[in-house]
Amino acid sequence: MNKRVAALAAAGLLALAAPARAGLPATEAQWVAGAAGAVAFGRAQGIPIALEVEAGDGLPGHTPVGLASENGRCTLIVAARDNPTADKLSAMVDPALVDLFLAGAAMHELGHCYRRLAGFPHNEKLLPIVSWLAPVRHWFERRVRTEEAFADMTEVAWLARYHPELYGPLLRQIVQVRSRFREPKHDTLPWLEIAQAEGPLDGPESVFLLAGKRLSRYH
């Protein structure tokens, strides 16, 4: 972890102790603190993953926390600074839960990393030459949706194991955000609704294996 990331992570830990202010977006340090926790968790599970921090482009639509993978390694990228999407997203969340929400968002990306390193496809762009074919487009959307559902279920399994007392409240926040930005490729609400109904189930397996079990609940 470089000095900039370490400094931001330390500032994020201070932010965790500070009282939350309603309606205000999370700081870059808070996003980095959440991501640093996911990276540490992944490394403890033997996953080769690094953390990078960069600025957004000042335009909406830029993912505040995303993933890159190459040569059997993943990089979790935080781009919350100068990013209207990061501000809008975090301001939607209950201030009392925002830090846990950001940590969960990073765990979602760790779920993607786990699947990519296991060989599952992850391209979210369909070639224009075949995108007009409805059967191909629908198959592609289902495949992307499956990967999003697995990532969400990784977050759910992590939440159930390490924060069961906040499982219900945070899951309601996740459902709220998914409902606000609902679209076919990222529509994981059927899995999330089952997870809500089942409660914070845990087991002896890793959170990734538990995510796979939850994935099969609706698939």
Image (cartoon, rainbow, N blue to C red):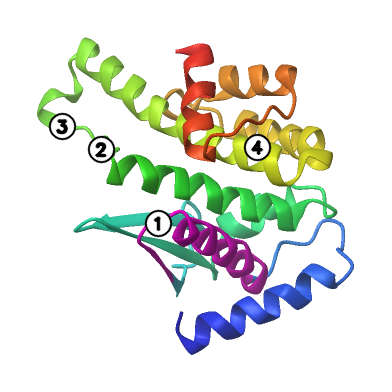
Numbered tag placed on residue 46 in the rendering: 1
Q: In the image, is 142 to the left or to the right of 19?
A: left
Q: Is residue 128 above or below residue 95?
A: above
- In space, the residues marked 3 and 2 are separated at their CA atoms by 9 Å
Dot 3 or dot 1, earlier in sequence: 1
Mark whose residue sits in front, 4 or 1: 1
The stretch in magenta equals 28-51
Q: Amino acid at mark 3?
A: Pro
Nearest the eye: 123 or 108: 108
Mark whose residue sits in front, 1 or 2: 1
Quarter that holds the C terminus: top left
Residue 101's spot in the image, x, y percent? 69, 50
Q: Secondary structure at mark 4?
A: helix
Please say if the residues under marks 4 and 3 sit with CB atoms less than 8 Å apart. Answer: no
Q: Which residue is mark 2?
A: 125
Dot 4 or dot 3, earlier in sequence: 3
- In space, the residues marked 3 and 1 are separated at their CA atoms by 37 Å
Please say if the residues under marks 3 and 1 sit with CB atoms less than 8 Å apart. Answer: no
Dot 4 or dot 1, earlier in sequence: 1
